[in-house]
Amino acid sequence: METNQSYKIVNGFSYLSILFLPIIFPLIVWLLAGDRAEMRYHAIRAFWLHLIPTLLTMISVIFIGSVGLFTGNAAHVGWLSIILIGILAIVSFVLFIYNIVKAVQIFIS
């Protein structure tokens, strides 16, 4: 197998790992890429694309908890939770589709 072809496979799997090992696989590829700039670029990009929904979820939970703790108003916290979860679901879905599209683009090129 040609070296560039194997790099393309690893690059594609960095994005496609959203299905089987999100965050972990791109991190491993990033750490093992060494001086392979293209591999490292795609691994870093996939890592952050996988990490964004996780960070947004943690920030949302902390924010909702803080608002609930300090206001004590269940109605406001309920609506805030619904809105934030909706936004989070949309962002996560868009990033999920983007990762799959990016993997297919790499495999086809």
Image: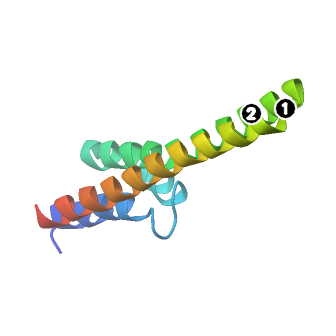
Q: Where is residue 64 in the image (x, y as percent from the top left)?
A: 74, 36
Residue identified by numbered label 1: 73
Instruction: Farthest residue to the top: give it.
Output: 70
Q: Which of 59 and 39 is in front in this view?
A: 59
Relative to 22, is 35 above or below? above
Residue 34 visible here: no
Q: Position of residue 8 (x, y in %)?
A: 22, 61
Q: Where is residue 25 in the image (x, y as percent from the top left)?
A: 48, 60
In the rendered image, the quadrant that contains the C terminus is: bottom left
Instruction: Farthest residue to the front: give it.
Output: 75
**Residue type marked 1:** Asn
Q: For the point 45% across and 42% down, which residue is it?
A: 48
Q: Which of 106 and 65 is in front in this view?
A: 65
Q: Position of residue 29 (x, y in %)?
A: 43, 55
**Residue type marked 2:** His
Residue identified by numbered label 2: 76
Label 2 Cα crowd, 10 Å radius (few <14 / some 14-19 / many 20+): some
Relative to 22, is 56 above or below? above
* 51 left or right of 8 in image: right
